[in-house]
Image (cartoon, rainbow, N blue to C red):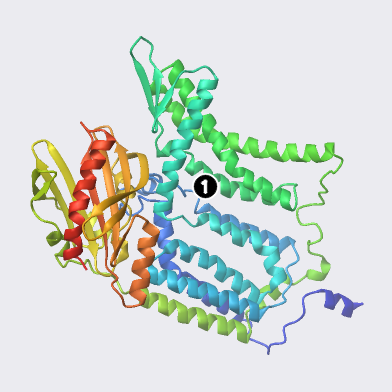
Amino acid sequence: MVELQTEKASPPLTEPAWPVWMKPLLWVAVIATLGRMFWTMFQAMWERWFPAWTSVHLGLYDRIVSGESYYTHGPLVPLVSVVIVLLLIRHVRVPVRPMPKFGAVVLGGSLLVHLAASFARVNFISGFAFIGVLCGLVLVFWGGTALRRLWFPIAFLFFMVPLPEFTIADLNFHLKMLSASAGVKLANALGIICARSGNVVTLPGETLGEFKQLVVANVCNGLRTLISLLAFGALYAYVCRLRGWWRVGLFSMSIGVALVANSIRILALLVVAHIWNEEAATGWFHDASGILIFVLAFLLMFGIEKAVLWIRVLVKRPAAFGGLFAGQLRTAEDEGQVSRLVAAIASRRGVACLMALVLVAGGIWWINRQVHNPYDSGMARQAMPVTMTIDGVHYDSHDIELTVQEQTILETKDYLCRRYTVGARMVEFSIIFSQDNRKGTHPPDLCLEGSGQDIVHKQDLVVSDVRGRGDVPVRELVTRSSTQNLYVLYTYKCGLEYTNSFWRQQWVIWTNGLLARNASGALIRVVVPMDELDIEQARKRASAFLREGVPHIDDNLP
């Protein structure tokens, strides 16, 4: 009988006996090496969680709460994952049946992804590679059954990894327009007369000829709510009474719940502005509704679960719920489980994993120490003429200096920021160039929003009839602020080609660098104030400058 119980429990390790002190020491070494290997990634994530963290002149509280972050929930995610892992190990059977070959494949592949991401300096890919490394280590030390038990707290770490800022900016724009449109339609359905122009909603004032305006800014677009509720939806689906695909469906509904909750918030803001004024809508009620939206979302998720359970009872297919971990709970036969899990590292495969991690950590350290010095060849300033004649109009120019902080962010000093003027007309032509560093050519969307501009229009275009090029793909933006409206036209030069795609430009520069080809890159941006121009006039003027400027850039930049 004793032998039968021993077979049901996890099989004993066949490795030679190791000193007791060696087991925790190996775990400490593995954890420390992982920390060193992913240090740059964690540092970048922390700064995305708390954008004002590097502002050392602020107090600790202000460094945490200031800045525009979409991942303030980020630090809670690993804490929640650790708590769930500890609860699972304490209450659920986690056998030790190592799968060293399959685990080595997963671990090795994840480490290669991390190496490539570190070389390319793409931190969010490293964040996903970190999750793959954890899965590989679990397979090597504990096996596939253990990974099935622990899959959720490991997968939950996805919600701590911030998406690229360009992706956030793109989602911001689309969700901002969607939220404004949904809010206006709901308000009109309730009999509140309002109209939308971009992200600006106009309502009639109290007297004839007066109007009230509300701006649906980034803070109201629902992206923060969506990102946070996806994490909450995953956690809720994990502990709810639904099973199988019903769980997946409930998690998927968290996207709709976030959008619906935010649309209701926009509607509430319009109602308050309609009954009272804009100050009340954008003041205390705006802040209070930002908190209440999460309460509403929780009630909606709870209601959806209840509705599914009720419908299943109605169709006489009730959901069977035998507990969260039915059939997986620990029994008396699993005594000593924690000791077995800890002892699993005391083997040749444990030492091999540690050596592989140390080797990769050394490679990551060597890659990260290759700091790109600010590049300044003077090429960008020589790329464009000081005077230009556009459509028969002669423009003179003067150069604008970027601040030291802006040059540090761009990681290049080789730039041109030149303002061409004639009378009241002004066109700003900028080139950010680097011969071997793609980090300088980030999308202008981020800088514009960071400077207080609100993007209200965005689309891809083609500037045709460019000498020596034909068509050049570009992207246009229209921005608004309290002081000025701007029209922006930009494109990327990557090697010998032009593209309006940030990701294609990054890929071309990176692969050219690997293949020892022309790895230079440049952001070319034309800005036209729209104070007295409509979008067609601004587009025509900016296109003319770009059409004239590209041949000069081709002649003077590699």
Residue shown at 44% from the left, 18% from the top? 274
Three-letter residue code for mark 1: Ile
Disc 1 element: helix
| Quadrant in which the C terminus is drawn | bottom left
Task: Classify 252 as above or below 183.
Answer: below
**Pick the front one: 59 or 151:** 151
- Which is more toward the observer, 120 or 338? 120
Q: Nearer the viewer, residue 517 or 455?
A: 517
Residue 462 place in picture, x, y as percent: 32, 50
Above or below residue 110? Residue 61 is: above
Horizontal arrangement in the rendering, residue 431 relative to residue 188 (left or right): left
Does residue 24 appear in the picture of this structure?
Answer: no
**Residue lying farthest to the right in this orientation:** 1
Residue 421 in the image, given as x and y percentages of width and height: 10, 43
Residue 362 visible: yes
Quarter of the figure with residue 449: top left
> Residue 15: image x %, image y %?
69, 87
Residue at the top extreme, as displayed: 207
Image quarter of the N terminus:
bottom right
Residue that appears at 62% across and 76% down? 103
How crowded pointer 1 is (Cα within 10 Å; few <14, some 14-19, many 20+) is rated as many
Query: Where does label 1 land, which residue?
Result: 227
Residue 180 vs 39, above or below: the answer is above
Residue 30 location in percent, x, y?
53, 76
Q: Answer with left or right where residue 495 lies relative to residue 104.
A: left
Quarter of the image holding residue 200?
top left
